[in-house]
Image (tube, rainbow, N blue to C red):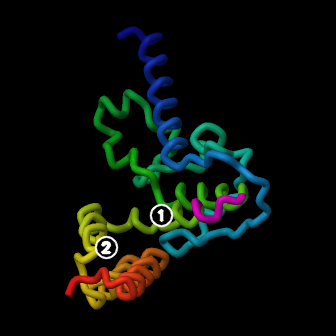
């Protein structure tokens, strides 16, 4: 492969990654929101608290310096050469809680509070093993769990993973399922 083609391909890969990140957390229609709560990151620090707004969306294109991989590499460090050499793994392409929290701040600023809350829940879920997320998802289906099992899941989310937003959602589901007779007997 010539240097010219390799550079073009690296540029293309970088643009695909930016586009993927933008679509993964797309904002869609926007309003003119003023709410600017700086969320604490999933790890308990406010390091991900940056001044961001609609002008920064999509982050991958307009503020790539704010996006880091789970290993701490910058988005601009992801190159075709590093992928080919095995330096970049599939886990390096996963979104981080900090990026999701930045996207949540943008969503709040454009009057999308429900979407912002979804992004915060997603940020919490990044700390939970995929297999456990699937188990919890299945446990939340109607008639699959008792109220006590759902409350135990909520306690696990809150205490083991510090996923307070998700824990509250599971507790709320337990209450609703009880009222609507959707719990396992």
Q: Position of residue 107 (x, y in %)?
A: 65, 57
Name, please, the residue furthest toward the front: 180
User: Which image quarter: residue 109?
Assistant: bottom right
Tag 2 secondary structure: loop
Judge whether residue 159 can be spotted in this image.
no
- Work out which quarter of the rendered image holds the N terminus and state it: top left
- Of circles 1 and 2, the one toward us is 2
Q: Position of residue 74 (x, y in %)?
A: 51, 45
Q: Say if 141 sits above or below 159 in the image.
A: above
Q: Say if 40 sits above or below 54 in the image.
A: below
For residue 146: magenta? no
Tag 1 secondary structure: helix
Q: Could you say which is closer to the camera, residue 47 or residue 24?
A: 24
User: Which image quarter: residue 173?
Assistant: bottom left
Judge whether residue 143 can be spotted in this image.
yes
Question: Principal SS element in the magenta part?
Answer: helix
Q: Is residue 83 left or right of residue 73?
A: left
- Going 34% across and 33% down the picture, which residue do you hit? 83
- Number of other residues with Cα within 10 Å of mark 1, as a class: few under 14, some 14 to 19, many 20 or more: many
Q: Which residue is mark 1?
A: 123
> Magenta span covers which residues?
111-115
Q: Disc number at residue 140?
A: 2
Q: Position of residue 135 (x, y in %)?
A: 24, 69
């Amino acid at each position: 492969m010539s240097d010219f083609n390799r550079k073009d391909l690296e540029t293309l890969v970088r643009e695909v990654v930016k586009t993927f990140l933008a679509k993964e957390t797309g904002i869609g229609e926007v309003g003119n929101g003023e709410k600017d709560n700086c969320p604490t990151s999933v790890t308990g620090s406010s390091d991900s608290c940056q001044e961001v707004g609609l002008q920064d969306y999509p982050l991958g294109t307009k503020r790539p310096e704010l996006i880091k991989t789970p290993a701490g590499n910058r988005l601009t460090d992801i190159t075709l050469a590093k992928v080919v050499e095995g330096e970049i793994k599939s886990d390096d392409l996963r979104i981080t809680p900090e990026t999701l929290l930045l996207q949540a701040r943008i969503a709040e600023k454009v009057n999308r509070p429900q979407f912002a809350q979804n992004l915060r829940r997603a940020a919490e879920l990044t700390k939970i093993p995929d297999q456990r997320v699937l188990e919890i998802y299945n446990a939340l289906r109607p008639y699959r769990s008792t109220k006590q099992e759902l409350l135990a899941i909520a306690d696990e989310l809150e205490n083991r993973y510090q996923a307070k937003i998700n824990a509250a959602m599971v507790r709320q589901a337990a209450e609703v399922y009880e009222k609507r007779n959707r719990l396992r007997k």
